[in-house]
C-alpha cells in the first residue's frame, strides 16, 4: 500500500553538551533543539483537504533531544564521523471553515462551523554526519533515517450561531485516511513509517 505523505522539517536549531578527553578526541554529548515542520507529499490534499496552507508561518513548532557521538577520523580532529540518536516531536495543523446553509442546532441557526485538527507525530531520527572542524567552527553534512513510532490526533469544532453565541466541542480524534477508512486518534497508517532525508549544519 502506497504511503502518500511525509513530514518536512524546514528549520532546526540545537545545542549540545559534550565530554571529551581532548579537543580532537572521541566525544559523547547530549543534544537538544527545536524543529519547524509541516506535511507534504504527492497527494497530501487527500489528508489535509484542498485548501491546506504550506506557508512558512503555518508550520508547527516542535522539539528534539538525544545523544550524539563524535568519532575522529584524522589525528588532528579536523575530520570526524558524528552519528546521533534523537527523539523528534513533529506535527501539523489543519484548519477549515464551513459557511452557508448549515441548518439549526438546539433551536439556533448555525452561521459557521470551524474545524481545527492538531496532529503530533513521534519520530526516532538517526543522522549519520560527516563533520569538519576548522578552528572552532564546524560543518556537518549527511543522511538521516527517521522512524515514525507514534501519532496522536486531536480535533475541535467551534460552531457559531447567528445570535452571536458559539459552542466548542472536542471530537474523538478519529479521522478518515487517504483510502476513506475511519482511523482512530493514534493511527499512523496514512503516513510513511520510514523517511530518508538530508541534514546540514554549522556551529561552534
Image: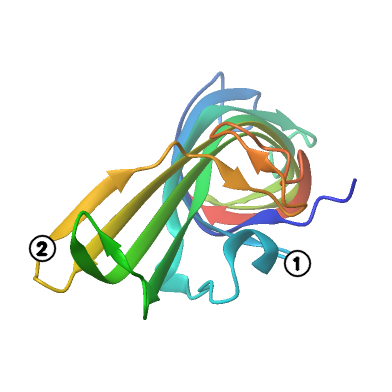
Residue 78 occupies which quadrant of the picture?
Answer: top right
> x and y percent of residue 109 in the render?
22, 69
Q: Residue at x 10, y 63 (%)?
A: 165
Q: Residue at x 40, y 41 (%)?
A: 171
Asked whether the residues under the numbered discs 2 and 1 touch, taking CB atoms below 8 Å apart as contact, a structural biologist would say: no
Q: Is residue 126 above or below residue 90?
A: above
Q: Which mark is residue 195?
A: none
Q: Which residue is mark 2?
A: 165
Residue 41 occupies which quadrant of the picture?
Answer: bottom right
Q: Which residue occupies the extreme front position in the image?
A: 107
In the displayed structure image, the side of residue 124 where residue 10 appears, left or right: left
Of pointers 2 and 1, the one earlier in the residue sequence = 1
Comparing 110 with 59, the one in front is 110
Local SS, label 1: loop
In the displayed structure image, the side of residue 196 where residue 162 appears, left or right: left
State which quarter of the image contains the N terminus: top right
Q: Which mark is residue 43?
A: 1
Q: Residue at x 60, y 55 (%)?
A: 201
Mark 2–mark 1 Cα distance, whole angstroms, equals: 37 Å
Q: Is residue 66 above or below residue 82?
A: above
In the displayed structure image, the side of residue 49 where residue 112 appears, left or right: left
Q: Residue at x 29, y 45 (%)?
A: 169
Amino acid at each position: 500500500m502506497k504511503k502518500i505523505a511525509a513530514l518536512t522539517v524546514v528549520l532546526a536549531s540545537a545545542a549540545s553538551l559534550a565530554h571529551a578527553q581532548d579537543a580532537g578526541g572521541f566525544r559523547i554529548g547530549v543534544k537538544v533543539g527545536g524543529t519547524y515542520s509541516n506535511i507534504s507529499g504527492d497527494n497530501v490534499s487527500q489528508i489535509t483537504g484542498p485548501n491546506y496552507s504550506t506557508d512558512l508561518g503555518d508550520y508547527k513548532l516542535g522539539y528534539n533531544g538525544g545523544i550524539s557521538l563524535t568519532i575522529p577520523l584524522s589525528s588532528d580532529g579536523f575530520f570526524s564521523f558524528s552519528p546521533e540518536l534523537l527523539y523528534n516531536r513533529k506535527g501539523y495543523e489543519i484548519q477549515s471553515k464551513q459557511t452557508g446553509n448549515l441548518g439549526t442546532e438546539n433551536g439556533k441557526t448555525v452561521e459557521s462551523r470551524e474545524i481545527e485538527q492538531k496532529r503530533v507525530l513521534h519520530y526516532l531520527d538517526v543522522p549519520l554526519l560527516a563533520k569538519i572542524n576548522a578552528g572552532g567552527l564546524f560543518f556537518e553534512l549527511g543522511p538521516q533515517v527517521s522512524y515514525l513510532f507514534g501519532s496522536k490526533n486531536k480535533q475541535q469544532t467551534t460552531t457559531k450561531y447567528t445570535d452571536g453565541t458559539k459552542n466548542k466541542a472536542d471530537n474523538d480524534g478519529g479521522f478518515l485516511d487517504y483510502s476513506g477508512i475511519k482511523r482512530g486518534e493514534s493511527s499512523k497508517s496514512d503516513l510513511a513509517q520510514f523517511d530518508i532525508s538530508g541534514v546540514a549544519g554549522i556551529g561552534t
